[in-house]
Image: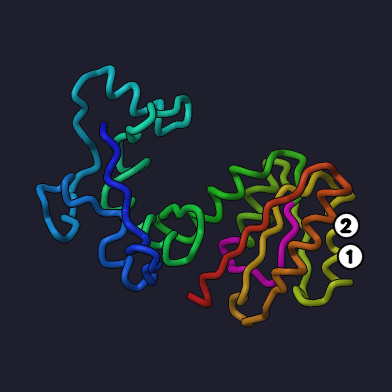
């Protein structure tokens, strides 16, 4: 399908504020009968012009192929993409100043999907403590059953305490993820993000691969 018109982030040399961009960013009225506001699309499935187009859209969405220049991947199924979800994702990304955004139905689905994407059997997750109960259960019961270990640190601003936990994690296996919750639930304890970056780089230098840093910021939001 033809790619949507790119959303403007500037008027001349003036950069639009995020509050202004929230009004229209990520929505192309030409794709919705000229509607000024995004319609609510009450559908989970979408029509393809041909079986070949459907095949290509699935390949684009799954990352098996790149769409041709000047085209978009197309809508496939709401579990992958949906007009309303894409608008929200685009606007949240521009508001937070990030490269991209993905919506999930719950915080635990976001955490579980992220950890399963990056952690493999034999890996270790270095994490802050305390954690939300669902996250702790995921680490100690579910992921442990798949051979993924976990080592926690209780003070996220004490470099020596974090480094001690990091050393213990590295001794158990490849540290693929540093998972932090800040402010934590329910104690509101904080984690030093710059310290996490420093520790991640040190781990990367010692094991040859740098763990990603995953932050659950739910309590602040």
Q: Position of residue 124 (x, y in %)?
A: 76, 49
**Which stretch appears magenta?**
125-135
As rendered, which of 169 and 100 lies closer to the eye?
Answer: 100
The residue under the point 26% across, 31% down is 1
The residue under the point 61% across, 77% down is 183
* Tag 2 residue: 168
Q: Position of residue 156 (x, y in %)?
A: 75, 73
Q: Is residue 144 left or right of residue 18?
A: right
Query: Residue 88's quadrant in the figure?
Result: bottom left
> How many numbered circles does the render carry?
2
Q: Is residue 211 left or right of residue 110?
A: right
* Number of other residues with Cα within 10 Å of mark 2, as a class: few under 14, some 14 to 19, many 20 or more: some
* Tag 1 residue: 164
Q: Is residue 161 left or right of residue 130?
A: right
SS at circle 1:
helix
* Number of other residues with Cα within 10 Å of mark 1, as a class: few under 14, some 14 to 19, many 20 or more: few
SS at circle 2:
helix
The residue under the point 59% across, 76% down is 185
Q: CA distance from mark 1 to mark 2?
A: 6 Å
The residue under the point 21% across, 20% down is 50
As rendered, which of 220 and 173 lies closer to the eye?
Answer: 220
Q: Position of residue 80 (x, y in %)?
A: 37, 41
As rendered, which of 147 and 205 lies closer to the eye?
Answer: 205
Residue 119 belongs to the span the image colors magenta: no
């Amino acid at each position: 399908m033809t790619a949507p018109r790119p959303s403007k982030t500037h008027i001349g040399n003036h950069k639009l504020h995020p509050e202004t961009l929230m009004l229209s960013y990520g929505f192309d009225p030409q794709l919705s009968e000229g509607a000024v506001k995004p319609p609510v699309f009450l559908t989970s499935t979408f029509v393809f012009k041909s079986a070949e187009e459907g095949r290509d859209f699935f390949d684009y969405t799954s990352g098996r192929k790149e769409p041709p220049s000047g085209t978009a991947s197309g809508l496939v199924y709401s579990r992958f993409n949906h007009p309303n979800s894409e608008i929200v994702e685009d606007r949240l990304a521009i508001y937070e100043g990030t490269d991209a955004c993905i919506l999930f139905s719950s915080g635990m689905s976001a955490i579980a999907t992220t950890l399963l994407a990056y952690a493999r059997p034999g890996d270790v997750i270095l994490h802050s403590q305390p954690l939300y109960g669902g996250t702790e259960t995921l680490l100690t019961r579910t992921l442990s059953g798949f051979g993924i270990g976990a080592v926690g640190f209780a003070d996220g601003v004490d470099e020596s305490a974090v480094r001690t936990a990091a050393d213990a994690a590295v001794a158990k296996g490849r540290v693929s993820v540093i998972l932090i919750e800040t402010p934590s639930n329910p104690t509101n304890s904080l984690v030093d993000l710059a310290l996490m970056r420093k520790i991640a780089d040190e781990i990367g230098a010692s094991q040859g691969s740098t763990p990603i840093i995953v932050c659950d910021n739910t309590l602040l939001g």
